Amino acid sequence: MKYHKIEQLTVFLAFLAMGTLTANAQDVMTLNDGNEIRARVIEISSTEIRYKLFENLDGPTIAISRNEVFAINYENGEREIIHSATDSANPSERREPLDPTIHRQHIAPGGRGKGFRPGFKGIIEYGYQYGIGDYPQNRYVLNLILGRQMNSHFSWGIGAGLRLHTFWSLNEKNPNDWYLYVPVFADFRINFSDRRFTPFFSMSAGYALHDDYGGVFLSPQIGVSRVTRYGLKNNAMHFGIGFDRQRRDYDVDLPEPILLDAISLIFSISF
């Protein structure tokens, strides 16, 4: 099979997604003297704020006293007042300091949730699809999705992967023959809570590329996620069940397009 153009398209989409995700992903600290610092905030404690300069994210971590910072505008649009006149003038009205053990990105819009955090999100999916209908084709699925967690509930991404279909002939399976498709698609996900365990719904839609007879496909899925955060802010495990419908376009063996339906069992990890 000739997949040179397919490989080029997949690499292009991956770089496009990464470029979109990194644009404008910065925090802005406003100091009491009016100056601003473009940064990536690492940690907020009861006495200081640790950050990296946005222009030098690979550089050293810098610490600044909380008393020197008036407010922080985070990359997700949230604004937090750190030190104001009220803090000095009326101690009884001082704001409760953040728990120093909590990374600032644990703070999701609307509260200190334990679920997903805004920022980059990658997903690796592996699954098996059991063919049903008039033209059953079982298939193995491997996908890579690069996207963005917009808030604790909604994310989107662009994906590409591999689909290995077993061959069918007159409704009789022949395990020695198979088709390889390369799907390119958009992925949208909704998490129904801001907790470590959350049910989710996802929808993937795109086109499965093949040298001879590709086709569009639609793949909704429901399942449950478990946020783990082993060193990564959106690290989680997901298990889902869904329905997959792929259109196989015209070819010499089939004068009309056909629909390849399947029940999906998908395990995935996000990072």
Image (tube, helix red, strand yellow):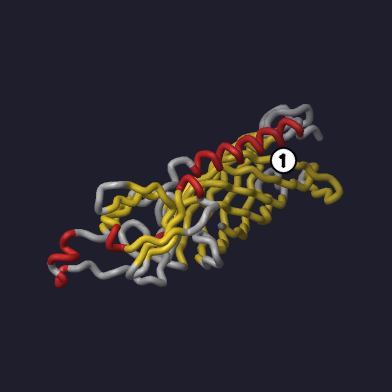
Q: Residues within 10 Å of mark 1 (few under 14, many from 20)?
A: many
- Where residue 180 appears, as percent x and y from the top left, is 76, 42
- Where residue 168 appears, as percent x and y from the top left, is 78, 44
Residue 137 in view in this figure = yes
- Where residue 116 appears, as percent x and y from the top left, is 45, 59
Above or below residue 89? Residue 3 is: above
141 horizontally vs 79: left or right: right
50 horizontally vs 170: left or right: left
**Element carrying mark 1:** strand
Residue nearest the viewer, comparing 208 with 65 = 65
What residue do we see at 78% from left, 31% from top?
A: 253
What residue do we see at 50% from left, 60% from top?
A: 233
Residue 188 in view in this figure = no
Above or below residue 44? Residue 159 is: above
The quarter of the picture where the C terminus appears is: bottom right
What residue do we see at 20% from left, 59% from top?
A: 84
Q: Amino acid at mark 1?
A: Tyr
